Image (cartoon, rainbow, N blue to C red):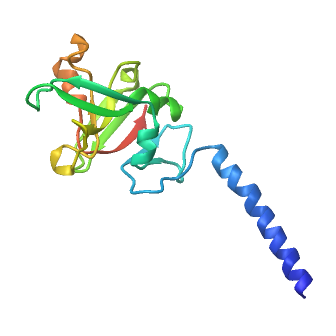
Amino acid sequence: MIHQFWKAMAAFLMAVAVAVPAASANGFDAPGGPVLLTVSGKIAVTNVGDTAQFDMAMLEALDSRTIETTTIWTDGVQRFRGASLLALTTLLGIEDGVLRAAAVNDYSVEIPVSDAVEDGPIIAYELNGAPMSLRNKGPLWIVYPFDGNGAYRSEQIYTRSIWQLDRIEVVR
């Protein structure tokens, strides 16, 4: 009887050892902290069901950039730090379509995947060296380098700078 127990235990452990790498083969680790961003829709890489979920540590691990720029919502030059939108789309295998970005209050905007370029927008998680609270347009805010590229200073681009971001759905 003891022999059967250990035989069953060995079979169970072997099944777990095979299943865990298989689950990770199509994605990356699940978040260990509070989820700040959930990406769904037409994505090639997932980590929780059919979504990609990110906590702060995971966002910080993406290609982090700092943008110093003025905005139409703040006074003076602000320093934003965050994950490159290009790094996010690359990680998730997003090559085309539209990102429907939504805020905590369900406000949403559409951002073409073609905006995810080198030196383009970031998903900011810090403003002037500090995390952003929900009250202060955080915890996530899509910010374009408005001062670095005149093409970004347009009404169309301003509408894409969504704050209190908590989810993105890849559509079309």
* Side of 28 relative to 80 (left or right): right
Residue sitting at 75 percent across and 58 percent down? 17
Residue sitting at 77 percent across and 62 percent down? 15
Q: Residue furthest bottom?
A: 1
Residue 133 or residue 153, whichever sits in front: 133
* Side of 17 relative to 104 (left or right): right
Residue sitting at 36 percent across and 28 percent down? 65
Q: How far across and how far down the image is residue 172, in percent?
A: 43, 31
Q: How far across and how far down the image is residue 102, in percent?
A: 29, 43
Q: Residue furthest left?
A: 75
Quadrant holding the N terminus: bottom right
Number of residue marks: 0
Residue 151, relative to residue 79: is it above or below?
A: above
Q: How far across and how far down the image is residue 48, in percent?
A: 52, 53
Residue 73, relative to residue 54: is it above or below?
A: above
Residue 86, relative to residue 53: is it above or below?
A: above
Q: How far across and how far down the image is residue 4, in percent?
A: 89, 81
Image-quadrant location for residue 59:
top left
Q: Residue furthest front?
A: 129
Residue sitting at 83 percent across and 68 percent down? 11
Residue 46 or residue 118, whichever sits in front: 118
Residue 68, relative to residue 135: is it above or below?
A: above
